[in-house]
Amino acid sequence: MVTLSTAEGPERTPDGRYVVVGGRRWRASDPHIPGPLRQELVEELMAARRAVRAKESGARRRVQDAKVALGERGPRWWEPLTPGDAATRIESATRALLRKRDGASICPSEVARIVDGADWRALMDAVRDAAIKLSGSGELEFTQRGRRVSPPFTGPIRIVRGPGFDGVPAAED
């Protein structure tokens, strides 16, 4: 197996899609995720791993969502996104960011930037559609100018935890 060593981290395969640790290949994170958002997802992943060790309820789902959002699991980040692949990463990125922000809202454009950093604007409708689907199960709610709103809506929105998010009641704003 040919690998490339970098000063910035572990060895990578020549195509950059995998890191090599102890002779094993692991899928690398999507390099197109903007730095600050990547950092939030990595912090959520580390917190989720600690929760797994502590045997907390729902911890494995947290790890899965963070890894899918980072591109380390689920749809391959280097392949063209199908609508289904986009929806999978959108839902995972939304949940991971909301967990990391612990009650604070997120912007749909942040989720789109995680899923497709280069062409994020083209994903905005898909992000809204996925969020509306998650709101149907009570996981998410929407705000506009600080007030809760329901679809259909126009204009900028924020996404917040709903009463059914991870089975825990939402924090009050």
Image (spheres, rainbow, N blue to C red):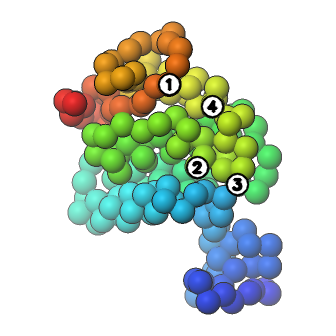
- Label 4: which secondary element: helix
Which quadrant holds residue 81? top right
- Label 2: which secondary element: helix
Mark 2 or mark 4: whose residue is earlier in sequence: 2
Q: Residues within 10 Å of mark 3 (few under 14, many from 20)?
A: many
Which amino acid lies under the numbered mark 1 shown in the image of this protein? Pro
Q: Nearer the viewer, mark 2 or mark 1?
A: 1
Which amino acid lies under the numbered mark 2 shown in the image of this protein? Ile
Q: Which mark is on residue 171? A: none
Give the image location of residue 147, x and y in percent: 31, 19
Q: Is residue 75 above or below residue 24?
A: above
Residues 91 and 167: in front is 91
The Cα–Cα distance between marks 1 and 3, rounded to whole angstroms, is: 27 Å
Which amino acid lies under the numbered mark 4 shown in the image of this protein? Met
Mark 3 or mark 2: whose residue is earlier in sequence: 3
Q: Quadrant of the N terminus?
A: bottom right
> What residue is disc 1 on?
156
The Cα–Cα distance between marks 2 and 1, rounded to whole angstroms, is: 18 Å
Q: Residues within 10 Å of mark 2 (few under 14, many from 20)?
A: many
Callout 3–callout 2 Cβ contact below 8 Å: no
Confirm whether residue 27 shows in the render. yes
Mark 3 or mark 4: whose residue is earlier in sequence: 3
Q: Is residue 98 left or right of residue 107?
A: left
Q: Is residue 97 above or below residue 170?
A: below
> What residue is disc 3 on?
77
